[in-house]
């Protein structure tokens, strides 16, 4: 601890208080989140949905999956068309958890084209930005 010499004991007390405040702020800064979670605390990604189902009806594709449970803050729905070997993967929707609504566990894709086969998978994400592995894929042909 630093000592300050002087006639006024308030100077010594103020310096000690300032040093204590500095040490407190420095240690608190280490607990702030960074891109990989919290310093010193390993974050585990949430589990992905165990199953995904895709079904087509009247030019729409309905995708359903079971809720993973607590700790999930959003689901991301991905799709690719099986029209070419180099089909482009697209994230087509994000379902975030809000204060007033629970997570949805289904999605209706209105952008499908009849005769095209689509493959979907889901990821779950937590509040720290950790993303799960991909769920199993579900494939269906639009009618």
Image: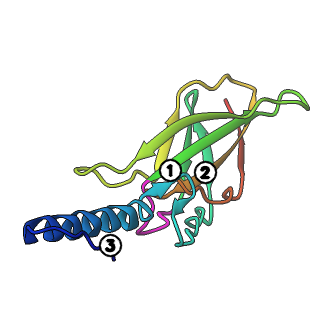
Q: Earlier in the sequence, mark 1 or mark 2?
A: 1
In the rendered image of this protein, does residue 70 appear above or below residue 111?
Answer: below
Q: Which residue is mark 2?
A: 122
**138 with respect to 108 (left or right):** right
Within the image, what quadrant is residue 119 found in? top right
What residue is at 67 percent from the left and 37 percent from the top? 79
Spatial distance from mark 1 to mark 2, Cα to Cα? 7 Å
Q: Quadrant of the N terminus?
A: bottom left
What residue is at 40 percent from the left and 69 percent from the top? 70
Please state the horizontal and vertical placement of residue 11, each as a whole percent of the image: 14, 64
Q: Which residue is mark 3?
A: 2
State the SS at label 1: strand
Please state the horizontal and vertical placement of residue 77, each as a whole percent of the image: 58, 43
Q: Quadrant of the C terminus?
A: top right
In the rendered image of this protein, does residue 81 appear above or below residue 52?
Answer: above
Looking at the rendering, the stretch of residues picked out in magenta corresponds to 66-73
Q: Are marks 1 and 3 in contact (CB under 8 Å)?
A: no
Q: Which residue is mark 1?
A: 75
Question: In this view of the protein, can residue 128 be seen by the observer?
Answer: no
Q: Residues within 10 Å of mark 1 (few under 14, many from 20)?
A: many
In the foreground, 72 or 111: 72
Q: Are marks 1 and 2 in contact (CB under 8 Å)?
A: yes
In the rendered image of this protein, does residue 111 appear above or below residue 139?
Answer: above
């Amino acid at each position: 601890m630093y000592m300050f010499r002087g006639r006024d004991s308030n100077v010594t007390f103020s310096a000690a208080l300032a040093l204590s405040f500095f040490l407190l702020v420095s240690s608190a800064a280490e607990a702030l989140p960074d891109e990989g979670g919290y310093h010193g605390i390993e974050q585990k990604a949430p589990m992905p949905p165990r199953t995904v189902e895709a079904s087509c009806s009247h030019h729409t594709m309905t995708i359903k999956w079971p809720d993973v449970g607590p700790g999930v803050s959003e689901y991301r729905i991905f799709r690719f068309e099986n029209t070419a070997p180099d089909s482009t993967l697209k994230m087509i929707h994000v379902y975030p958890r809000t204060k007033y609504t629970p997570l949805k566990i289904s999605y209706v894709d209105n952008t499908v084209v009849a005769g095209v086969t689509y493959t979907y998978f889901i990821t779950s994400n937590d509040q720290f930005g950790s993303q799960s592995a991909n769920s199993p894929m579900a494939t269906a042909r639009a009618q």
